Amino acid sequence: MKTFTLGYSPCPNDTYIFRAIAEGKIDLSFGLDITLADVEMLNRRVSMSLLDISKISTSAALNIADKYWLLRSGGAMGRGCGPLVVSAEPDSIKDLRNATIATPGNMTTANLLLRLEGTHVGKRVPMQFDRIMPAIVEGEVDAGVIIHEGRWVYREYGLYEVLDLGKWWEQETSLPLPLGAIAVRRELGGDFAAQVEEKIRESIAFSNRDPEGAWPYMEKYAQEMSPEVIRLHIDAFVNEFSLNAGNEGEKAMEKLLRAACDLENRPFPKRGIFWS
């Protein structure tokens, strides 16, 4: 049996989605060597073609479009689930125009959204997502773009919401926000991509049928996260778009990537970004 490399994050939405695959609850015709890592680390590994299948930030797809397809299942997309700009003071985004703002990585969708919104023109400092709120509190940066569980716990750090970048995107486009997607190496072929896409759907369906059974695997990688925040995470990031991006989801992903191309004055990839 041939083995392929798979990467996804330790965040509850990813571990919920991939739990059945990781624990051998569904049948596969191939083996998997699984790596869990921060999404920006996964972005870097995919940009170096080090993973066969991986969760990536949607914004990172432009850099790997010649070597990877995007799947229509397993991603992170929705409404009311976007990154937040937060600071230690009740500022407006205009107040932070020239501020130093931490982001969860240069290739992340969060960083792209801050650039697309356009008000901030100051320094952006990439750092691992779980360091951003402490860095604001400690005065290392003026503000930060927080993702994952940060959206529910930033008040515990005494921080204030400045801007909801997801809400901004939805108001601008009337589309769901495509935060992340699953990428598969093109050289493995369309049949393989289709099989992976279907197995991810099976894995999600398995967890949906037995959500409580997914808890040990999720908690293994979210040890400092309260059960309440884990549930909020699943409710926000695992939805109908996780099973199938559909026409609206595909439109949202293309809209985001075309906006990035316009921002960077680069052509949209000539090869289709999806496997079919």
Image (spheres, helix red, strand yellow):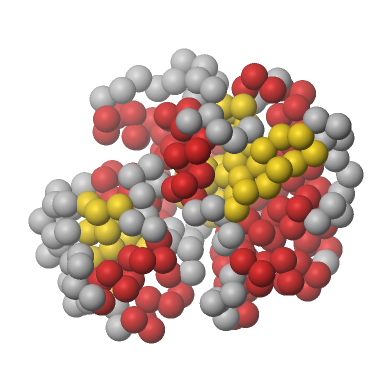
- Is 89 left, or right, of 114 in this rendering? left
Using the image as rendered, state which of residue 201 and residue 168 is in the foreground: 201
Residue 126 x, y percent position in the rendering: 30, 52
Q: Quadrant of residue 198?
A: top right
Say which quadrant the C terminus sits in.
Answer: top right
Q: Residue furthest top?
A: 270
Q: Residue at x 66, y 72 (%)?
A: 219
Q: Is residue 253 above or below residue 66?
A: below
Horizontal relation, residue 181 to residue 20: left or right: left
Q: Is residue 106 above or below residue 103?
A: above
Identified at 57% across, 44% down, the residue is: 55
Across and down, in percent, residue 83 comes to 39, 59
260 vs 144: above or below: above
Residue 73 appears in view: no
Q: Is residue 200 above or below residue 153?
A: above
Q: Is residue 255 left or right of residue 4?
A: left
Q: Residue at x 78, y 73 (%)?
A: 212
Q: Is residue 25 visible?
A: yes
Q: How many marks?
A: 0
Q: Quadrant of residue 209?
A: bottom right
Which residue corresponds to the image point at 74% horizontal and 71% vertical from the top-left?
216
- Quarter the N terminus occupies: top right
| Image position, residue 168 (x, y; %) | 34, 55
Residue 71 quadrant: top right
